[in-house]
Image: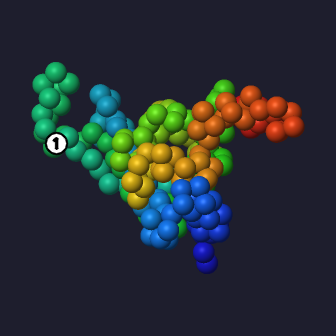
Amino acid sequence: MENEFYRHYKDRVVPALRERHKYKNVHQIPRIEKVVVNTSIGSQPDVKQALDEAKAELALITGQQPAETRSKKSIANFKLRKDQLIGAKVTLRGDRMYEFLERLIKAALPRIRDFRGVSPRSFDGHGNYTLGVPDQTIFPEVELDKIKRNIGFDVTIVTSARTDEEAKSLLSEMGMPFADRAKKLATASPSEGGPAGREQAA
């Protein structure tokens, strides 16, 4: 059964991007290739326990078992040794990727207190976007009374877009609430949906 969010991409996002950027070939239209969710246990004193908890939270949020990450080199100032366990990550593709993105955009981000949209400046210059999530409590599947420690993580969305502008168009059409887009909605006149825009941005 085809994922609903992927169907949205095919049926609505692709035609919108083709019209906006005048793509001549369907293979030019940007797509999301993978989503990487990673977290660092930092300088936690109980490294093994912290890592186990981080892996459990990532598995719950993404539906996939995380891989452990290790430092690539030693950094004396941070008391970091080469090959030291420093965190965990999950790489999502296909249906799980679309399911995660749908939950992130539609359910998790709106739960952030005083949310005003995500930064439009977090692209890497190659069409990929990284979003920082302060803690796991924004995901509805996380049970608050079972949380032992707050775990922040980064979500990197890797796209096939050639430019950041094209990648932003792709993510905007997928529903990513960029802050500058929210401001435009908030300042729109009533005839253009101003009050509704203010409610959505809030």
Residue in view at x 16 percent, y 42 percent:
72
Q: Is residue 116 visible?
A: yes
In the orientation shown, which residue stands out farthest toward the bottom?
Answer: 1
Where's residue 159, x and y in %?
42, 56
Q: Nearer the viewer, residue 102 or 194?
A: 194
| Above or below, 15 relative to 141 | below
Q: Quadrant of the N terminus?
A: bottom right
Residue 30, x across and y down, in percent: 47, 60
Q: Is residue 72 left or right of residue 120?
A: left
The residue drawn where x is 66% and y is 47% is: 107
Q: Quadrant of residue 48?
A: top left
- Work out whether residue 116 or residue 59 is closer to the camera in this orientation and state it: 116
> Does dot 1 land on a helix, a strand or a loop?
loop
Instruction: List the single residue furthest toward the right.
Output: 191
Between 88 and 197, the one lying in front of the other is 197
In the image, taking residue 10 as reference, residue 192 lies left or right, namely: right
- What residue sits 72% from the left and 35% below the top? 185
Q: Amino acid at mark 1?
A: Lys
Label 1 crowd (10 A; few <14 / some 14-19 / many >=20): few
Q: Is residue 154 visible?
A: no
Query: From what the image shows, is residue 77 above or below residue 47?
Result: above
Q: Is residue 90 left or right of residue 76?
A: right
Q: Position of residue 20 (x, y in %)?
A: 59, 55
What residue is pinned by disc 1? 72
Q: Report the coloring of the rendering.
A: rainbow
Number of callouts: 1
